[in-house]
Image (cartoon, rainbow, N blue to C red):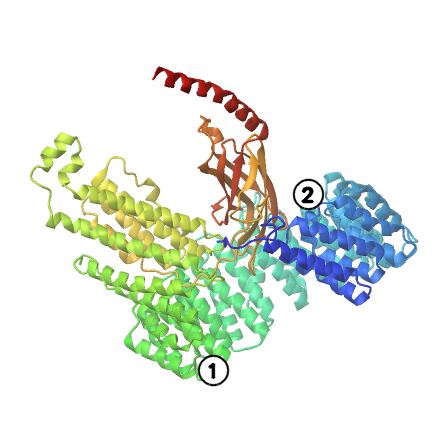
Amino acid sequence: MASNSTKSFLADAGYGEQELDANSALMELDKGLRSGKLGEQCEAVVRFPRLFQKYPFPILINSAFLKLADVFRVGNNFLRLCVLKVTQQSEKHLEKILNVDEFVKRIFSVIHSNDPVARAITLRMLGSLASIIPERKNAHHSIRQSLDSHDNVEVEAAVFAAANFSAQSKDFAVGICNKISEMIQGLATPVDLKLKLIPILQHMHHDAILASSARQLLQQLVTSYPSTKMVIVSLHTFTLLAASSLVDTPKQIQLLLQYLKNDPRKAVKRLAIQDLKLLANKTPHTWSRENIQALCECALQTPYDSLKLGMLSVLSTLSGTIAIKHYFSIVPGNVSSSPRSSDLVKLAQECCYHNNRGIAAHGVRVLTNITVSCQEKDLLALEQDAVFGLESLLVLCSQDDSPGAQATLKIALNCMVKLAKGRPHLSQSVVETLLTQLHSAQDAARILMCHCLAAIAMQLPVLGDGMLGDLMELYKVIGRSATDKQQELLVSLATVIFVASQKALSVESKAVIKQQLESVSNGWTVYRIARQASRMGNHDMAKELYQSLLTQVASEHFYFWLNSLKEFSHAEQCLTGLQEENYSSALSCIAESLKFYHKGIASLTAASTPLNPLSFQCEFVKLRIDLLQAFSQLICTCNSLKTSPPPAIATTIAMTLGNDLQRCGRISNQMKQSMEEFRSLASRYGDLYQASFDADSATLRNVELQQQSCLLISHAIEALILDPESASFQEYGSTGTAHADSEYERRMMSVYNHVLEEVESLNRKYTPVSYMLLLYGCGFFIHLWHLLLLAFQLALSPSPRNPAEPIAVQNNQQLALKVEGVVQHGSKPGLFRKIQSVCLNVSSTLQSKSGQDYKIPIDNMTNEMEQRVEPHNDYFSTQFLLNFAILGTHNITVESSVKDANGIVWKTGPRTTIFVKSLEDPYSQQIRLQQQQAQQPLQQQQQRNAYTRF
């Protein structure tokens, strides 16, 4: 996943080219800081964040921040303000400052200035550094002292610093709480300052006693100061404190509901709704049935649509969580809590046909979530209400192009997908409604409706051949202009057609699509449609579209990329001609497919560049080729039993060798080789899976299915031929059927189960097994999965001057190897999974030996260590102590991998190698030389005696 060519400025330990670039950049900025012109100084200061981003390692960051601290100490207030902004922008690099004491000392010296503005900037600077100096008592004292200042700018800065230190330091929060309380309750404190002091109390959550005292103070404020601004700020701080402490959340929900119900001010009601939404998202399990009931009553009674919309948004959020099950659970003392008779359902039914689109959308979402969550069988009326509400909302919003209507339409379509998945018997009516409305809808709505149709059809086979005609008629009508909406609609509707056609697109349908693409589409639209055709298994259509695009690209890399996709589509098209019980043409089909796959992999290799190496795509296609070759070899092996049966003496040989498998002749060895080959392929698929940290779940699931198919074939061979007694299929009995989210996965699961039944019954041979998996398990090609974005930038110290030059170390000493790294993300970090820790594995092997061959224990010959570190702000660092007792050159390899939040280890790389030369220590060398000199006269005397005797 990470390129080994990614090097840091530390890679050469002060001597390499990358280090020189970092030093030269820092020296250039240092010249600007030393300039006598204020403009050049400011320009140099504001360029530091870019330097930190480019070289994110402690040595440079420490030096740079010390230089900025000098500027802060001796510069004017404008320069100090620039340094403050740079510090706030580089917050995640603050922990890499090595000389924290010296850095803070230079900053803190300005706090004694007579200029209140300078003191204010210093206080804000200290507040920005609270994460690395949370327990500095001098900073705590300065903040407390500045809160009593008569300068408003300094007091506001002290409030900012107090909030930051309260969030980081428990001691400071305990000490400042009483001070804040006195200032808020004091008559001399202005109201605007009180409004700024109150939010500090949200950070008083370090222990239960502190949180309780802060809560009591806020309760007094809400009661004592009934003005709108004070109530809003106090209530919001109340909510944030409860959400952080997690102790008083139910009480806070009751308090907010009380203000929502009894306070006449709309501003307070809106704030209560906003905070209730926050608590509904963060802690839905703390909502009781009474809380939801009270919110429903308020929504039923309010005459204001804006407030009703807010309350319904809270209820729609809760309806998709565990809170809805609590609401409809059987309560002791109540005879019935049926969903049909509850106020929540009445409210949702009332709002489904509201003239406000937002209210109607939330009402429909509540009904949908209730219908999907409640597993009762007598919900027919509720299901019909949800379907009718969705239909009315669809008709209303599909005729409007406004952004609000489109947002509402997205909510309705998401509810349709969820309803079709949770209640499959309703999917047919939902699809018919979408197809009917598709003809009269606006283009923007049509695009969203096509996405919804494709999402439903991928889960359930609801689009039949009868609906394909209507879709083709609609495809003829649309696309008369070349606008962006029309282009997007062409792609979306083509995707629905591909799903409906079930891999068998008719000649007429192809002609209609090609005609529309030739008239109004651009190359990018054609490419997107070809991609969708490949995903849905329409490889013949995809091949023709890729062929038409070959001459429309301006780069040879793009040409080779499109050519490889064309060859892959052609190869997959060859495999669609396979039919069950017809093995005569199977080998020819596989051979023809392999021919095009080899052409495609050559083009794909040519399409790769250093910035886009296409490593995942190449590895996946290589595995696909090897899998087809393994299937071909397996079929040939099965056929060889007919053409080359066992010899007549096979039974005698088997009895002599004591191996019953020899009765089958040489086919037993061939089957064993096939089994090992499939297991090897499964292992390679597993390695590809572990190396794909940034892959989406569908891609990983596909790789996992390919791995399972290989394992299933190997186990089938073992059970039927090699060792029936030891083969076990328990781990394949329910291979992910509960996680099958698409029709493709369900077909794969059905094939797996069928294979298991056939093998266990032993009524049929294994040739049909391999054939069926070839037809179904490999007919899907992961089309586009671009360059993986996660990478690591590793730096090792000590490092040699030249990468090929070894590091010298004495054999009686140990080498302390420091490994630093920076996690480099793409544009969307943590999109599918997040990094919990980085696993670093260090190993050393002896490359060449020098000196005498002493007998040294095996433990001293190699080093094998592993450590796990948690990156903080994408930076991690650790050390290893290595022993090199054997004289010679050793090869040290540092390999990194990632552990995600679920505990799964991903082999992302990179892999870094350095050389170490172990030298003999001077004292041992001196002793050895003395022993050699003492032995030389004795050896000469022995030689003379030998000559004399001769």
Labels 1, 2: front one: 1
Vertical placement of residue 311 versus 93, above or below: below
User: Residue 357: x, y in percent?
Assistant: 58, 71
Packing grade of label 1 (10 A; few <14, some 14-19, many >=20) is few
The residue tagged 1 is: 482
Residue pictured at 82% horizontal, 41% vertical:
137
Q: Are marks 1 and 2 in contact (CB under 8 Å)?
A: no
Q: Amino acid at mark 1?
A: Ala
Residue pictured at 18% horizontal, 57% vertical:
583
In this image, 442 relative to 18: left or right? left
The residue tagged 2 is: 247
Please say whether residue 721 is visible from this viewpoint: yes
User: Dividing the image into 4 quarters, which one contains the C terminus?
Assistant: top left
Q: How many marks?
A: 2
User: Residue 342: x, y in percent?
Assistant: 56, 55
Residue pictured at 30% horizontal, 38% vertical:
728
Please say whether residue 277 is visible from this viewpoint: no
Packing grade of label 2 (10 A; few <14, some 14-19, many >=20) is some
Quarter of the figure with residue 478: bottom left
User: Residue 622: x, y in percent?
Assistant: 35, 56
Identify which residue, 3 or 650, lies in the foreground: 3
Quote the CA–CA distance across marks 1 and 2.
Answer: 58 Å
Vertical placement of residue 253 versus 349, above or below: above
Quarter of the figure with residue 425: bottom left
Vertical placement of residue 64 versus 500, above or below: above
User: Which element type, helix, strand or loop, lies under badge 2?
Assistant: loop
In this image, 94 relative to 400: left or right? right
Q: What number is the disc on residue 702? A: none
User: Residue 41: x, y in percent?
Assistant: 78, 63
Residue pictured at 33% horizontal, 49% vertical:
681
Q: Amino acid at mark 2?
A: Val
Identify which residue, 898 or 66, lies in the foreground: 66
